[in-house]
Image: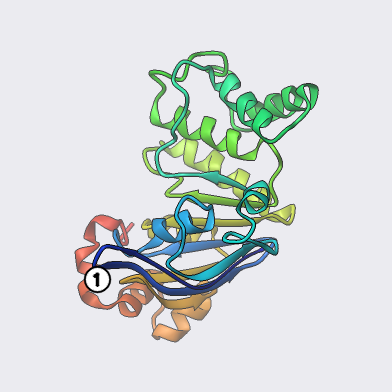
Amino acid sequence: MIDARSLVKRFGSVTAVDGVSFSAPDGHITGLLGPNGAGKSTTLRMLYTVLVPDGGEAWIDGASVLAAPLEARRRMGVLPSGAGLYPHLTARENILYFASLHAMARAEARTRAEELIGQLEMREFADRAAKGFSQGQRVKTALARALVHRPRNVLLDEPTNGLDVMAVRTLRGLLRRLRDQGHCILFSSHVMQEVAALCDAVVVIAHGKVAAHGAPDELRAQAGTESLEEAFVRLVGIEDAQSASGTDIGR
């Protein structure tokens, strides 16, 4: 379970996140939905301890991201925006390196890497150097790396960016399996299609604040609309929706 309470992050005079609070329970896929620049990625980066909050607190399965960041990191797997792979290592070596960082035994790590390579349909490129990978190959490798230690909580920042249709289908299937196994899945997106297809709960963020939080049906009821897209438009305000025309809310 991921619990965020009154998170604040400032960059100079700009307040990127302004009192964000929500809970993401186990066995659910929770989406952070909002226009570009709304504060979604900054919120995630505070949760996975890359950024230190200027206010508020968050916990990963009870481990404080402020007081016990190392313990919090052990309890989550993270797919950041931009895969950040080691280009001269193969996909398999990238996965095994992260397994070693989590102190996994070599035999266990090799078995787990092979399992993930199969699940994510990576066999064709598993033993190629990551330099020159397509975007889909980079995302699959980064996701396998994030899952190698079997984290209870999985955080993903714009996970479908640049993926083709088949890669998106593979990712969706994996996330649903993880949810059904009781994992807590939290991902950010500006693509309405992804949120509608995957999420049990949605946190709508605009101007660094939570504009609404609930199941898709609850958001539609709150906004008085029949579609999640229209609910989003009303909840964040028409100006946000128009400025986010690049956010694929119409997809």
Residue in front for this viewpoint, 182 or 10: 10
Q: How is the image coloured?
A: rainbow
Q: Which x, y percent locates residue 3?
A: 60, 68
Residue in front for this viewpoint, 99 or 121: 99
Hey, which quadrant is residue 2 in on the image? bottom right
**Residue wearing tag 1:** 240
| SS at circle 1 | helix
Q: Which x, y percent locates residue 124?
A: 55, 17
Q: Residues within 10 Å of mark 1 (few under 14, many from 20)?
A: some
Residue in front for this viewpoint, 232 or 13: 13
Q: Which x, y percent locates residue 41?
A: 40, 56
Give left or right: position of 169 versus 18: right
Count of picture labels: 1
Measuring 53% from the left and 52% from the top, which residue is drawn there? 48
The amino acid type found where label 1 is placed reads: Asp
Residue in front for this viewpoint, 12 or 130: 12
What quarter of the picture does the C terminus occupy? bottom left
Measuring 34% from the left and 74% from the top, which residue is drawn there? 230
Give left or right: position of 247 versus 146: left
Hey, which quadrant is residue 59 in on the image? bottom right
Measuring 76% from the left and 25% from the top, which residue is drawn there? 111
Residue 44 vs 149, above or below: the answer is below
Give left or right: position of 251 versus 49: left
Residue 103 vs 59, above or below: the answer is above
Q: Which x, y percent locates residue 180?
A: 71, 55
What quarter of the picture does the N terminus occupy? bottom right
Residue 100 vs 25, above or below: the answer is above
Give left or right: position of 81 versus 29: left
